[in-house]
């Protein structure tokens, strides 16, 4: 690693590797839970603190090792009463709390079994040699030893990364030590530190973090002796890539560090806050979140007709005004619209669209992909607009108000001939008034109202079904179990109760399909946390316990697999036998739900290969894809047709390659290969 005096920008800062963690700019913050001597001489207490650190999600735990005879003059240890009060306070504590090399090694093994990196601060050469013999991957150098070239020389010879605290140090002292280590080609980071216990925030001098980075070009962290978590989070925003904080189970225990240490809940909050801070300060993006898009639709405005406008009439400024929703032509294009010739009749309050600005109106030809029974999202008030697209199914999205309305029978009768050639799918509402639909709520009244609403949806679906083909109508619903909390709900999900509620519904002639859920669903224009139906086994258990089905949402599946660190295609393959309807959309990361096909992370070719023989229904479930005469959904259909062809081509090539390989095998091996492919393998000796 190169480090020298100069002026370094963020991209010029070197990185170091601690165990298997890369530490430096653009890398996750390396969080160290400093146990130090807060075990108070108890190896069981030390293990308890390691467990707390693991639960919090830190990267490493750190201890301290001393050989007191090597550190202090003999006179201090034998005639302590003759020395300053500070020595009289600390020496007895260090003597009582020091762990043996065997105990430290036991803690190292326990730490590594917990999946954490073991770190330790040697305060002397004897301790350093003991730690090196144990295979310690990285050494912390205390502020007290920043100037200790004798110890540093030994540590540098170990060729392990070093973390050096800079408390009690003037700039020239830091400079001399940096030069000393650079000369020995050491890999190291500097930790800004103020060696007071505790340090007042006004004295924390966090601006020094940027100064150290700029001056030395090495990773810089913060070793905090302040009370609480705020300064550590602020330090990361200033560029700190390592955070070290003491932890304890009781701030009143004997010892110098307990009072400035974090309790378990404080440590949990620190780690969560740092990870949130990392996410909040990623590279800027010129994209809107799904919640923003929903709010944009509700709160933004569009150009509407202020008075009736006839086809062929020149549009004047006086005929236009601006109203919500924001699903039409932007008010920024008001004067682009003035002077255009109206391409259609518009009533008062009708929204203008982008197509109204075009010189010519092109008829969009939509070709449904030749796979399964493709459909499109509709509502009561606009289902007839989807009929020209020749879909094989329709999915009605119900709001809570829709469940209370009578069927629009006159309009349904008008289009009975077209509808009877299609399969019916209904999506249960996600909101009940000002509350969420939640069959797994911890509150009985919300569960009861959700069951009542689902029964109303079933009743309406059964009534609707008389206008569609004879295939069993299927209803998509979300199970609920969401919360605003980051990690856990107040209570566990009562799965047997959920199954019981499903079993007591009067399904009439319908069947239910539970939808797999994303880790971060969007509700009320904001992001929530999902706690159920992310895992494939949870969905499978539901189907086998209730006899109902799954609506497989590809966007949700992609986000859930990324969140759970599972293989996406394996996840789909597990759920395929239980899937009767599919929502198709792309996904960006673990949060970008329902994006247009081809804009995210979903492996559609792999999906089509797994579901090549699928004959059930599906729809393009693009966020707001039904708006503007189904514009987003129609665009998705075009993309899907191309991806389907690509997957078929890939399957054909795979099959051809296998046949070629079989042809090149000796006849006995070729027969074995064919049997293996078809599953026709006979046991040995049969």
Image (spheres, grey):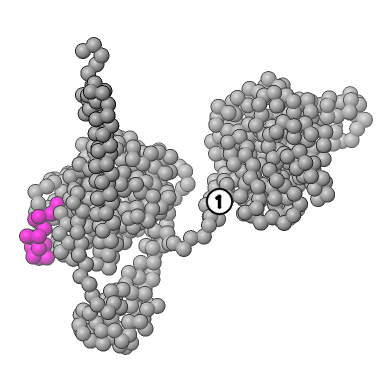
Q: Which residue is mark 1?
A: 278
Q: Residue at x 24, y 30 (%)?
A: 663
Q: Nearer the viewer, residue 523 or 154?
A: 154
Out of 506 and 281, give the one closest to the viewer.
281
Is any part of residue 112 visible from this angle?
A: yes
Furthest residue to the top?
A: 685
Say if 671 sits above or below 411 in the image. Answer: above
Q: Quadrant of residue 40?
A: top right
Residue at the (67%, 22%) spot, across then down? 103
Q: Which residues are magenta?
A: 410-428
Counting from the top left corner in percent of width and height, residue 672 is at 24, 23
Instruction: From this view, report whether residue 30 is shown above or below residue 460.
Output: above
Q: At 81% from the left edge and 50% from the top edge, which residue is drawn?
A: 171
Please name whichever residue, 283 or 483, is drawn nearer the observer in this view of the structure.
283
Q: Position of residue 567 (x, y in %)?
A: 38, 39
Up/down of 523 relative to 179, above or below? below
Query: What element does badge 1 sit on?
Result: helix
């Amino acid at each position: 690693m190169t480090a020298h005096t100069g002026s370094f920008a963020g991209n010029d800062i070197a990185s170091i590797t601690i165990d298997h963690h890369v530490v430096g700019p653009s890398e996750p913050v390396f969080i160290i839970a400093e146990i130090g001597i807060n075990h108070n001489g108890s190896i069981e207490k030390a293990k308890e603190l390691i467990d707390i650190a693991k639960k919090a999600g830190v990267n490493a735990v750190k201890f301290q090792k001393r050989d007191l005879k090597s550190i202090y003059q003999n006179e201090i240890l034998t005639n302590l009463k003759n020395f300053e009060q500070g020595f009289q306070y600390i020496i007895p504590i260090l003597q009582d709390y020091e762990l043996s090399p065997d105990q430290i090694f036991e803690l190292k093994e326990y730490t590594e079994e917990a999946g954490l990196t073991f770190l330790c601060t040697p305060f002397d050469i004897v301790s350093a040699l003991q730690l090196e013999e144990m295979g310690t991957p990285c050494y912390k150098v205390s502020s007290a030893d920043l100037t200790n070239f004798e110890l540093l020389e030994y540590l540098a010879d170990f060729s392990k990364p070093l973390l050096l605290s800079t408390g009690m140090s003037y700039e020239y002292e830091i400079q001399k030590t940096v030069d000393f280590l650079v000369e020995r080609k050491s890999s190291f980071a500097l930790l800004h530190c103020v060696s007071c216990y505790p340090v007042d925030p006004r004295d924390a001098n966090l601006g020094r973090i940027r100064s150290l980075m700029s001056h030395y070009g090495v990773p810089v962290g913060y070793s905090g002796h302040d009370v609480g978590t705020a300064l550590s989070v602020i330090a990361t925003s200033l560029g700190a890539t390592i955070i070290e904080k003491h932890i304890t189970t009781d701030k009143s225990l004997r010892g110098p560090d307990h009072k400035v240490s974090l309790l378990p809940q404080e440590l949990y909050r620190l780690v969560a806050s740092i990870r949130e801070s990392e996410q909040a300060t990623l590279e800027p993006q010129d994209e809107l979140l799904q919640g923003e898009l929903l709010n944009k639709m509700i709160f933004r405005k569009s150009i509407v007709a202020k008075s009736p406008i006839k086809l062929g009439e020149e549009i004047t400024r006086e005929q236009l005004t601006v109203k919500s929703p924001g699903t039409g032509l932007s008010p920024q294009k008001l004067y682009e619209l003035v002077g255009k010739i109206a391409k259609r009749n518009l009533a008062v309050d009708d929204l203008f669209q982008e197509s109204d600005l075009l010189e010519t109106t092109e008829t969009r030809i939509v070709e449904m992909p030749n796979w399964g029974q493709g459909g499109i999202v509709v509502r009561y008030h606009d289902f007839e607009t989807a009929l020209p697209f020749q879909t094989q199914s329709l999915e009605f999205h119900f709001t809570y108000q829709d469940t209370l309305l009578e069927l629009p029978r006159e309009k349904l009768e008008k289009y009975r001939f077209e509808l009877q050639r299609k399969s019916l799918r209904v999506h249960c509402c996600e909101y009940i008034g000002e509350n969420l639909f939640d069959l797994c709520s911890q509150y009985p009244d919300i569960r009861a109202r959700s069951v009542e609403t689902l029964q109303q949806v079933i009743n309406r679906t059964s009534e609707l079904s008389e206008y569609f083909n004879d295939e069993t109508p299927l209803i998509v619903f979300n199970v609920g179990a969401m919360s605003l909390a980051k990690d856990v709900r107040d209570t566990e999900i009562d799965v047997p109760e959920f199954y019981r509620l499903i079993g007591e519904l009067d399904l009439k002639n319908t069947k239910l399909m539970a939808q797999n859920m994303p880790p971060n669903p969007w509700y009320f224009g904001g992001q929530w946390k999902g706690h159920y139906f992310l895992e494939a086994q949870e969905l499978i258990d539901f189907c086998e316990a209730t006899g109902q089905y799954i609506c497989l949402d590809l966007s949700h599946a992609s986000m859930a697999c990324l969140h759970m660190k599972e293989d996406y295609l394996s996840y789909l393959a597990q759920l395929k036998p239980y899937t009767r309807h599919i929502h198709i959309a792309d996904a960006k990361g673990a949060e970008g739900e329902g994006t247009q096909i081809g804009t995210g992370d979903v492996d559609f070719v792999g999906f089509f290969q797994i579901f090549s023989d699928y004959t059930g229904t599906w729809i393009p479930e693009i966020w707001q894809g039904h708006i503007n005469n189904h514009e987003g959904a129609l665009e998705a259909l075009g993309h899907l047709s191309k991806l389907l062809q690509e997957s078929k081509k890939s399957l054909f090539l795979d099959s051809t390659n296998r046949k070629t390989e079989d042809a090149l095998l000796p006849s006995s091996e070729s027969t074995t290969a064919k049997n293996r492919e078809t599953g026709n393998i006979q046991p040995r000796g049969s």
